[in-house]
Image (spheres, helix red, strand yellow):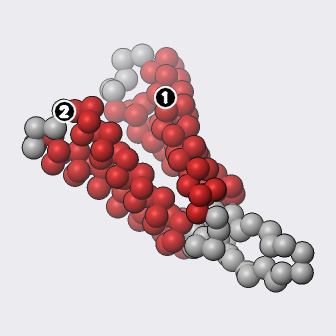
Amino acid sequence: MKLITATQLRFGLVGVANTLVDALGYALLVTLGVPLFVANFLSTTTGMLLSFTLNRNFTFRAKDGDVRRQALLFFGVTAFGLWVVQAAIIFAVTSAFPGVHVLVPKFAGIAVGLVWNYVLYHKVVFRPRPAAAGTPVPEVTHD
């Protein structure tokens, strides 16, 4: 049994790339005097767009799927993971461990969010769609 699959490795690389784009873009925009909220919105949006493009084409190789459907599902899954799952984990960790360093619950939320995203991207967002009757389905593997 493999410890990590090629798809999981690609997912990790994409995660690093979009996180760097987000963080560096945010830092650059703030340095240029862009207000924090606007800088964060622009950098996270850029990171999510990069993430969608790379996960669709590189990680899960789902180029033949309906891009509009994939985009809606991707942004729904990602937003829920960021704003609900991560927030719930942060709340749970800070409630269970009062006084814990502020980054501990954040990193716990990020870790759970990564698992959430990977599973739903793999099983829902970028899964191969069944073809019409009589049409051969190309074999797609996600490792």
Residue extending farthest to the left is 32
Most foreground residue, 83 or 111 = 83
Amino acid, disc 1: Ala
| Residue highlighted by disc 1 | 87
Q: Residues within 10 Å of mark 2 (few under 14, many from 20)?
A: few
Image spot of residue 92 (x, y percent)? 53, 23
Most foreground residue, 50 or 3 = 50
| Residue 60 location, quadrant | bottom right
Image spot of residue 11 (x, y percent)? 49, 63
Identify the residue shown where x is 82% and y is 83%.
136
- Mark 1 in CB contact with mark 2 (< 8 angstroms): no
**Quarter placement of the N terminus:** bottom right
Looking at the image, tell me whether mark 1 or mark 2 is earlier in sequence order: 2
Identify the residue shown where x is 68% and y is 55%.
124
Q: Residues within 10 Å of mark 1 (few under 14, many from 20)?
A: some
| Residue highlighted by disc 2 | 35
Amino acid, disc 2: Pro
